[in-house]
Amino acid sequence: MKTLKDVKIGESTTVLKLNGQGAVRRRIMDMGITKGVNIKVCKVAPLGDPIEITVRGYQLSLRKDDAEMIEVK
């Protein structure tokens, strides 16, 4: 299982599944990260947290813990 955390800088991928439950999952979906959407990893902070991605045409920063909940191709 490959997660968004494992994607390298500059690579694009597609969301397969959102893990997690309740408010955390709802928050991720509210940010536009849903099944089938394309995501590009733009930057990763020096210590690996947070991760900056482009999703649906805008920039978004995600914590490493949240990125682990997103399964990708």
Image (tube, rainbow, N blue to C red):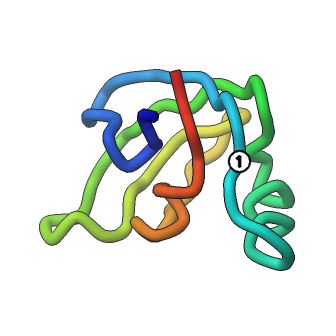
Q: Position of residue 44 (x, y in %)?
A: 27, 55
In this picture, is 7 found above or below 19? above
The amino acid marked with disc number 1 is Leu
Residue 38 x, y percent position in the rendering: 64, 25
Residue shown at 70% from the left, 38% from the top: 17
Image coordinates of residue 32 in percent, x first then y, are 79, 47
Quadrant for the N terminus in the image: top left
Q: Residue at x 83, y 78 (%)?
A: 23
- Residue 37, compared with residue 50, is above or below; it is above
Residue linked to disc 1: 18
Q: Residue at x 65, y 44 (%)?
A: 58
Q: Is residue 16 left or right of residue 5?
A: right
Q: Does 33 sit left or right of 68 as displayed?
A: right
> Looking at the image, which is closer to me, 26 or 58?
26
**Quarter where residue 64 is shown:** bottom left
Judging depth in this view, the residue of 59 and 65 nearest the camera is 65
User: For the residue carrying disc 1, how many other residues have a C-alpha within 10 Å: few (<14), some (14-19), or many (20+)?
Assistant: many
Which residue of the protein is positioned furthest toward the front in this rendering? 1
